[in-house]
Image (cartoon, rainbow, N blue to C red):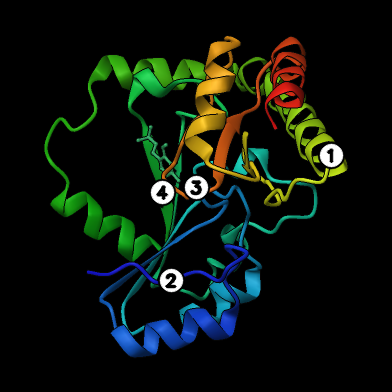
């Protein structure tokens, strides 16, 4: 198992992805779109090229797909005719149901049958299934905050860029931004002002999750004093 490298801007082109698949010839390729911690969705051409080049299964993790910017193409669009493609999603993010521990996948019926064969018995409790069914029945209410979070996310990206910071394009509910110095110093300075962001271990970069409008205001005001 290995992790393939991304470019300096954290992007992944079809040519780079294919070169790495050819080099490692993995049984399973995981593509994360939108990616964590960068937040950027993959160009569908990358998924298509990897599907062509990969000798085995290609799993596209779309945990944050509901937050993607308009026009972003889901790998679901290329499922027909690609029996080695699996698209995974979760109810943890847009549904705000992380405590339910409920993920799901879309794939060719043959793949779904194979998964049914090897899955553990009672892998999802009856109560979890009932809660998930209720969540799906009330999806409009549960997904109602997604557009508000996307608006806050876009405001964070635009404001930090206006202030001259490098920011990764985000199709998720978080934003990866360059602090212009030691990220641990900025992380501590933000915390001292009551703002908790995430240090994901990328030197010089931090990740902030989009929440309410007041939280964005607090984050942006704190950033003005620390960078
Ligand atoms: C990219 C990505 N995929 C999948 C997950 C899994 O979420 P969960 O295990 O809550 O379904 C996460 C959680 O942070 C994630 O960031």
Residue 196, given in percent of the width and then of the height, sits at 53, 19
Of the residues tagged 2 and 1, which is closer to the observer?
1
Q: Secondary structure at mark 4?
A: strand
User: Earlier along the polypeptide chain: callout 3 or callout 4?
Assistant: 3
In the image, is residue 106 above or below residue 81? above
User: Earlier along the polypeptide chain: callout 3 or callout 2?
Assistant: 2
Q: Disc 2 designates what residue?
A: 5
Q: Secondary structure at mark 2?
A: loop
User: Earlier along the polypeptide chain: callout 1 or callout 4?
Assistant: 4
Q: Secondary structure at mark 1?
A: loop
User: Earlier along the polypeptide chain: callout 2 or callout 1?
Assistant: 2
Identify the disc placed on residue 36: 3
Marks 3 and 2 sit apart, C-alpha to C-alpha, by 14 Å
Residue 185, given in percent of the width and then of the height, sits at 51, 31
Q: Secondary structure at mark 3?
A: loop
- Determine if residue 225 is in view: yes
Residue 142, given in percent of the width and then of the height, sits at 61, 18
In the image, is residue 203 above or below residue 86? above
């Amino acid at each position: 198992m290995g992790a393939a490298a991304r470019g300096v801007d954290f992007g992944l082109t079809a040519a780079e992805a294919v070169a790495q698949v050819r080099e490692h010839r993995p049984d399973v390729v995981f593509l994360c779109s939108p990616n964590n911690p960068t937040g950027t969705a993959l160009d569908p051409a990358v998924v298509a090229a990897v599907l062509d080049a990969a000798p085995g299964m290609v799993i596209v993790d779309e945990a944050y797909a509901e937050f993607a910017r308009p026009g972003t193409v889901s790998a679901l669009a290329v499922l027909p005719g690609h029996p080695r493609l699996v698209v995974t999603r979760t109810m943890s993010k847009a549904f705000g149901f992380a405590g339910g521990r409920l993920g799901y996948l879309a794939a060719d019926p043959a793949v779904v049958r194979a998964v049914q064969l090897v899955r553990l018995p009672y892998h999802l409790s009856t109560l979890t299934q009932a809660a998930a069914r209720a969540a799906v029945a009330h999806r409009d209410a549960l997904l109602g905050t997604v557009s508000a979070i996307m608006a806050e996310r876009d405001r964070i990206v635009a404001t930090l860029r206006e202030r001259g910071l490098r920011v990764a394009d985000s199709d998720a509910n978080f934003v990866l931004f360059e602090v212009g110095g030691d990220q641990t110093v900025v992380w501590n300075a933000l915390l001292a002002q009551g703002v908790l962001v995430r240090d994901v271990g990328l030197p010089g970069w931090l990740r902030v999750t989009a929440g309410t409008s007041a939280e964005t205001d607090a984050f942006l005001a704190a950033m003005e004093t620390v960078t």
